[in-house]
Image: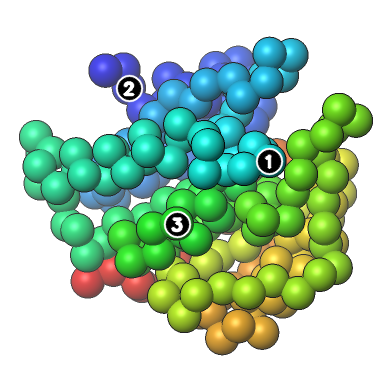
C-alpha cells in the first residue's frame, strides 16, 4: 500500500489540489481509501472504466464491490454508517456510477467536475454528453453534492447543472457548489464545504 495521495498526480495542479483535500480529510479524522485506477482505453490517461458501452462488463464494479466488502473487516475501525465517496473528472463519473450501483453503501457522495454516469458515452471522437434528457434515480440514491466550474472545457458546466436539477426533480437530497470562473480542475476553495456536507450526513 502507498499513501492515499500517491495517485493524485504529483506536480500537477489538479493533483496537489486533491492532495490538499486528502490532507484536510485526514486531519479531521476521516480514513481515506484512494484506489489506483487503470486505463480503460489504450490511448488515454488513467481513468475509471465508466465509459464502457456496457458498464456491467467492466472490472471496476466488481473491484469496488470487493473493496466495500473489505471495509467490513478492515484492519482499522470503520463507521459503516458514515461512508462517503468523491471523485474528480473520471473519478466523478465513477462516484456517480457507485452511487447508482451501491446506493445503500454511502451516506453521501460528491461529484466533482462530472455528471451522471449514464449521461456520457465514449466514442472515437471523444466523450459525448447528454445534458438534456431526463435522468431518473432510485429513492435510495445517496445525498449528492455537485461541484462544477463554469469554464470547464471538458465536462460542460451545463451537464453539471442539469445533473443537479435532475437530482432535485427526483427528490434526492442534493446541493450545488458552482464556481463561475472555474475550469476542469479540483475547486480547492470548496474543500471545507465538501467535508461539511459529508459530516452533516453521517451517523
What is the x, y in percent for residue 145? 55, 65
- The mark nearer the N terminus, 2 or 1, is 2
What is the x, y in percent for residue 188? 60, 45
Q: In this figure, which residue is indicated by the disc labeled 3? A: 101
Q: Residue at x 47, y 80 (%)?
A: 139
Q: Foreground residue, 80 or 99? A: 99
Q: In this figure, which residue is indicated by the disc labeled 2? A: 3
Q: In this figure, which residue is indicated by the disc labeled 1? A: 53
Tell me, yes or no, if residue 148 can be seen here. Answer: no
Question: How far is mark 3 from mark 2, CA to CA?
Answer: 27 Å
SS for tag 3? helix
SS for tag 1? loop
Question: How far is mark 2 from mark 1, CA to CA?
Answer: 33 Å
SS for tag 2? loop
Q: Residue at x 76, y 74 (%)?
A: 134
What is the x, y in percent for residue 3? 32, 22
Residue 155 position (above or below residue 62) = below
Q: Residue at x 10, y 42 (%)?
A: 73
Q: Residues within 10 Å of mark 1 (few under 14, many from 20)?
A: few
Quarter of the rendering occupied by the C terminus: bottom left
Amino acid at each position: 500500500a502507498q499513501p492515499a495521495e500517491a495517485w493524485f498526480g504529483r506536480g500537477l495542479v489538479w493533483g496537489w489540489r486533491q492532495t490538499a483535500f486528502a490532507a484536510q480529510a485526514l486531519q479531521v479524522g476521516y480514513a481515506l481509501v484512494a484506489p489506483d485506477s487503470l486505463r480503460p482505453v489504450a490511448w488515454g490517461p488513467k481513468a475509471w472504466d465508466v465509459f464502457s458501452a456496457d458498464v456491467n462488463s467492466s472490472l471496476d464494479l466488481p473491484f469496488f464491490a470487493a473493496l466495500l466488502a473489505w471495509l467490513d473487516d478492515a484492519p482499522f475501525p470503520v463507521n459503516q454508517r458514515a461512508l462517503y465517496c468523491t471523485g474528480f473528472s473520471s473519478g466523478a463519473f465513477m462516484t456517480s456510477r457507485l452511487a447508482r450501483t451501491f446506493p445503500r453503501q454511502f451516506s453521501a457522495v460528491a461529484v466533482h467536475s462530472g455528471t451522471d454516469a449514464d449521461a456520457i458515452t465514449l466514442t472515437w471522437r471523444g466523450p459525448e454528453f447528454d445534458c438534456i434528457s431526463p435522468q431518473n434515480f432510485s429513492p435510495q440514491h445517496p445525498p449528492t453534492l455537485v461541484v462544477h466550474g463554469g469554464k470547464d472545457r471538458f465536462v460542460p458546466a451545463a451537464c453539471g447543472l442539469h445533473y443537479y436539477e435532475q437530482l432535485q426533480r427526483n427528490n434526492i437530497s442534493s446541493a450545488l457548489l458552482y464556481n463561475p470562473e472555474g475550469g476542469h480542475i479540483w475547486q480547492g476553495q470548496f474543500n471545507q464545504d465538501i467535508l461539511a456536507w459529508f459530516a452533516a450526513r453521517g451517523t
